[in-house]
């Protein structure tokens, strides 16, 4: 026998297996299984059948299928109609219905307050068939300044508090829409959004609002649906609007491929005198624009703006309760993926009391933290000795602001106590971003911040198009009537004769239509026209109105003809929002993680003095390290140096300033003030080569403080020792590599002396070692690229060279007289003076200049020349090559104001081997400082 003959049929094997299994089962189990199988068979047979019963006709359905269908319907209802906001207007249905109902009832920011119960009743009866409590609590949240970054409802009465107090009953409170809410509803009556039937089909309600306001990001959202949830943080209006503007500026809106949209050309009719043809062509254009799909007119918006570009404007969430958020990278990840976690800390400060103890003062809480529960938690932590050192706890909040005061024991370590409170209480929380919203197609989707803004811009494009189409219809209809009136006024006698001969109104209408080719609407308007409008003045008004309407038509046609024009309107409207509602950011951003701070975050932005020696050692000093002395003093040791070293540069800065470091070889590097290590007065400092990548024989020659935002439109003027001057735009120094870039191309044996910021309209002064000075207009120096040489600023004698370079600001002339500005001159031998700047005449560039002082062996050559302003500058700090430093007040007693040809007075008595090498100025911080 073959294997095939030995093979049993499959059904026989299965039956045998079943029989064997049946033998092992108890008899009762087998009976139950048979009965269950029989019932299932009978039930399946009944599905779809209809049976007459005493309750009526009954149809058998599958409970499994019905549960699946019903639960899916319920889930979609919750997702679409309750829990998730629309990405376009940022509102859930209940919020949208509240605002629309108040709009229809005229309860706006200009009206009086209305009882909340009335508002809730209108919403329930007309649009929202759910519980009154849900509507009232939704409205309450829109009125809470601790829940909403910008309140949409202006509430009067008890609407709850940050302590978790419940709002008063709706019969007691009153409300109206806040002013900013009008930006969500503006143009809703211009056919801008689709309307749908309400729950009973008796009214219409908008499915989305026009929303000029980018509401989803401004107000945030939170909701739990079925199988999904959303949690979107609030943001700052100025930042969001700036991001939208940036996207529009870098983007474009193109019509779909294969688009055949085109307007009839009016060029030929404009050149001719045939007004009728021009009007006909205009109406043809209007017909095309009104019959074209708004999406086609708006086009598909595309932009190269990345999330990194967006985050240049949007720094992170901005919570209504303020606080401090951490970790820029985590925020960035949330913006890129739609999911992320933001750590929020309360704003807390440690202050010393009058009795010598310490307090922790909390003035801002993390978002959604209940203050009353927080206080209970802190008290519990103190009782359980989980946090030691707390003596007392008080809530000192009042109408002026929130304040929680935590008094500490004398032996407590304030920073340790605060850190434990951050760890164990809600003084530190986290906000888990989950940016889910309904898209324009009505589908729930996890969106990143770029997608949210793109959806908003696309929505606004459609709104502007639909609004313009509606305005076009209204203007066209009005123009049509005015055209008929003008025809009648032009043929007044014939019109009057026809009307007089006609037996009734209908006959007169028909006769006018036949005689002048008028439409039914035009003929009716003529018949309805009052006799007083036949006066010449009234006729002129009609002509002026027609000209205005025609101008409106042309404007709207131009707007709708190009998607770029629509984007320009959105950009202008967004800028208007900033003007009307923009405010300062409330939540501070720390770029590092909690416990990990960027150096900028750790270093306070405070005044400092930078000293640089000839051999390239730099350090940062506290200005308090220098004490003010009288003229002629010996000074104090400010810099510890090797015997052959000496100070070359001394500069007053702020620690967060951007420093452009120029070298003698014409290269420029970038440093932050805090990157220069802070040292004591006696310390030698840090070698410059450890901070920037200097080449062999390269040394730092000049340090310039530049603010990349405030100084973006300014220039940097560079002067060389050989008298050349060069001007370059600040923006050309934006991207400075770690290895530096070329700032100026130098001739052989020439070096860079100094750099100054200029406006483009200033005056320039160059002062030389031999005591010469020239003053000329900056406009004589053309702006050039970084790698150019520049032009001659002053003509020098053979052994002379430039030691001073100053800019006289054009704006200063408007604020200060010439006698309030002086040139401070310090010579090598410690002599000096001030001279009014009006004694230095404006000359042409490249001359030899005029004398600045009587230079003799006693005075020594010029060491430094600096512009000073009596109202701004406070003191001068002079440093010698042997490390002696003196600080002198800028008063007539210490440094007198003398004429140009004089020698000056002794400011600092020096040894024969010593000489002045560096001079710096300090500024007045408070009013009341002594001047002259």
Image: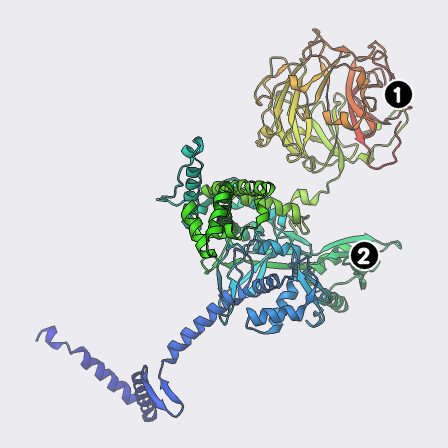
Q: Can the viewer see residue 396 in this picture?
A: yes
Q: Which residue is more in the foreground, 326 or 24?
A: 326
Q: Which residue is more in the foreground, 743 or 63?
A: 63
Measured as percent of width and height from the top left, residue 242 is found at 59, 44
**Tags 2 and 1 touching, CB below 8 Å:** no
Task: Give the mark nearer the N terminus: 2 vs 1.
Answer: 2
Measured as percent of width and height from the top left, residue 640 is found at 78, 28
Disc 1 marks which residue? 896
Q: Count neighbours of disc 2 (C-alpha within 10 A) and say few if under 14, some if 14 to 19, many if 20 or more.
A: many
Q: Quadrant of residue 659 in the image? A: top right
Q: Is residue 537 left or right of residue 917?
A: left
Q: Quadrant of residue 916 in the image? A: top right
Measured as percent of width and height from the top left, residue 681 is found at 79, 33
Q: Which residue is more in the foreground, 325 or 609?
A: 325
* Numbered badge on residue 237: none
The mark tally for this picture is: 2
Q: Count neighbours of disc 1 (C-alpha within 10 A) and say few if under 14, some if 14 to 19, many if 20 or more.
A: some
Provide the secondary structure element on which disc 2 rests.
Answer: strand
Disc 2 marks which residue? 359
- Give the Cα separation between the discs numbered 2 and 1: 50 Å
Identify which residue is drawn at 32% across, 81% down. 48
Asked if residue 514 is positioned above or below residue 792 in the image, the reply reads below
Asked if residue 786 is positioned above or below residue 245 in the image, the reply reads above
Q: Is residue 535 left or right of residue 196?
A: right
Provide the secondary structure element on which disc 1 rests.
Answer: loop
């Amino acid at each position: 026998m073959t294997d095939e003959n030995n093979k049993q049929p499959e059904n026989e094997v299965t039956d045998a297996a079943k029989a064997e299994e049946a033998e092992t089962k108890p008899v009762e189990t087998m009976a139950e299984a048979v009965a269950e199988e029989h019932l299932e068979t009978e039930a399946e047979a009944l599905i779809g059948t209809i049976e007459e019963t005493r309750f009526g006709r009954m149809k058998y359905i599958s409970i499994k299928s019905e549960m699946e269908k019903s639960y899916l319907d319920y889930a979609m209802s919750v997702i679409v109609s309750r829990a998730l906001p629309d990405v376009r207007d940022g509102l859930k249905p209940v919020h949208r219905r509240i605002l629309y109902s108040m709009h229809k009832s005229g309860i706006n920011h200009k009206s009086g307050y209305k009882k909340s119960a009335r508002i809730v009743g209108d919403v329930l009866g007309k649009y929202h068939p759910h519980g009154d409590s849900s509507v009232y609590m939704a409205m309450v949240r829109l009125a809470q300044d601790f829940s909403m970054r910008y309140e949409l409802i202006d509430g009067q009465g008890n609407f709850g508090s940050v302590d978790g107090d419940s709002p008063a009953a709706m019969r007691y409170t009153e409300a109206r829409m806040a002013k900013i809410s009008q930006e969500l509803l503006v143009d809703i009556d211009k056919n801008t959004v689709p309307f749908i039937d309400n729950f009973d089909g008796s009214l219409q309600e908008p499915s989305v609002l026009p929303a000029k306001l980018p509401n989803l990001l401004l107000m945030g959202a939170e909701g739990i649906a079925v199988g999904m949830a959303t949690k979107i943080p609030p943001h700052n209006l100025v930042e969001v609007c700036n991001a939208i503007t940036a996207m529009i500026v870098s983007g474009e809106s193109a019509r779909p491929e294969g688009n055949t949209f085109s307007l009839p050309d009016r060029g030929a009719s404009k050149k001719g005198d045939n007004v009728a043809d021009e009007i006909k062509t205009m109406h043809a254009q209007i017909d095309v624009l009104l019959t074209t799909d708004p999406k086609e007119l708006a086009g598909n918006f595309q932009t190269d703006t990345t999330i990194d570009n967006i985050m240049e404007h949007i720094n992170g969430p901005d919570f209504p309760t303020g606080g401090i958020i951490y970790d820029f990278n985590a925020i960035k990840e949330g913006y890129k993926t739609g999911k992320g976690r933001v750590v929020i800390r309360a704003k807390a400060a440690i202050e010393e009391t009058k009795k010598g103890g310490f307090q922790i003062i909390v003035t801002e809480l993390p978002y959604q933290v209940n203050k009353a529960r927080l206080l209970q938690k802190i008290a519990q932590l103190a009782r359980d000795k989980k946090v030691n050192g707390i003596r007392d706890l008080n809530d000192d909040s009042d109408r002026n602001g929130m304040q929680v005061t935590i008094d500490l024991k004398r032996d407590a370590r304030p920073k340790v106590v605060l850190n434990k409170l951050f760890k164990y209480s809600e003084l530190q929380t986290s906000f888990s971003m989950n940016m889910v919203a309904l898209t324009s197609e009505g589908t729930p989707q996890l969106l990143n911040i770029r997608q949210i803004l793109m959806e908003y811009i696309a929505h606004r494009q459609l709104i502007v198009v639909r609004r313009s189409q509606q305005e076009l219809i209204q203007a066209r209809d009005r123009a049509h009537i005015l055209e008929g009136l003008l025809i009648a006024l032009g043929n007044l006698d014939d019109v009057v004769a026809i009307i007089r001969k006609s037996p009734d109104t209908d006959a007169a209408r028909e006769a006018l239509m036949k005689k002048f080719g008028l439409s039914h609407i035009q003929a009716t308007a003529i018949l309805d026209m009052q006799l007083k409008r036949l006066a010449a003045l009234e006729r002129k008004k009609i002509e002026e109105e027609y000209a205005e309407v025609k101008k409106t038509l042309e404007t709207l046609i131009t707007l709708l003809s190009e998607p770029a024009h629509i984007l320009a309107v959105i950009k202008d409207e967004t800028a208007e929002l900033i003007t009307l509602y923009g405010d300062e950011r409330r939540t501070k951003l720390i770029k590092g993680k909690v416990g990990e701070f960027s150096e900028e975050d750790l270093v306070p932005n405070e005044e400092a003095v930078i000293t640089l020696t000839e051999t390239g050692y730099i350090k940062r000093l506290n200005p308090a390290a220098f004490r003010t002395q009288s003229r002629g003093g010996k000074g104090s040791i400010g810099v510890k140096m090797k015997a052959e070293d000496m100070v070359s540069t001394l500069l007053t800065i702020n620690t967060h300033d951007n420093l452009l470091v120029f070298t003698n070889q014409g290269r420029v590097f970038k440093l932050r003030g805090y990157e220069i290590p802070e040292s004591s007065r006696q310390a030698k400092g840090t070698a410059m080569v450890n901070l920037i990548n200097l080449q062999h024989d390269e040394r730092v020659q000049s340090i310039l403080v530049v603010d990349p935002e405030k100084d973006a439109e300014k220039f940097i003027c560079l002067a060389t020792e050989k008298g050349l001057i060069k001007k370059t735009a600040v923006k050309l120094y934006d991207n400075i590599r770690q290895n530096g870039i070329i700032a100026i191309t130098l001739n052989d044996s020439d070096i860079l002396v100094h750099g100054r910021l200029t406006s483009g309209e200033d005056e320039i002064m160059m002062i030389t070692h031999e005591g010469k000075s020239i003053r000329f207009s900056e406009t004589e120096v053309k702006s050039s690229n970084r790698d150019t040489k520049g032009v001659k600023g002053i003509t020098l004698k053979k052994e002379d060279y430039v030691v001073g370079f100053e800019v006289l600001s054009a704006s200063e002339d408007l604020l200060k007289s010439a006698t309030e500005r002086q040139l401070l001159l310090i010579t090598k031998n410690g002599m000096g003076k001030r001279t009014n700047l009006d004694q230095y005449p404006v000359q042409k560039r490249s001359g030899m200049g005029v004398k600045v002082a009587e230079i003799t062996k006693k005075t020594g050559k010029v060491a430094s020349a600096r512009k000073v302003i009596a109202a701004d500058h406070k003191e001068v700090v002079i440093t010698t090559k042997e490390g002696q430093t003196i600080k002198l007040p800028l008063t007539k007693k210490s440094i007198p104001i003398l004429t140009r040809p004089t020698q000056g007075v002794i400011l600092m008595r020096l040894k024969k081997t010593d000489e002045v090498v560096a001079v710096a100025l300090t500024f007045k911080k408070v009013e009341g400082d002594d001047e002259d």
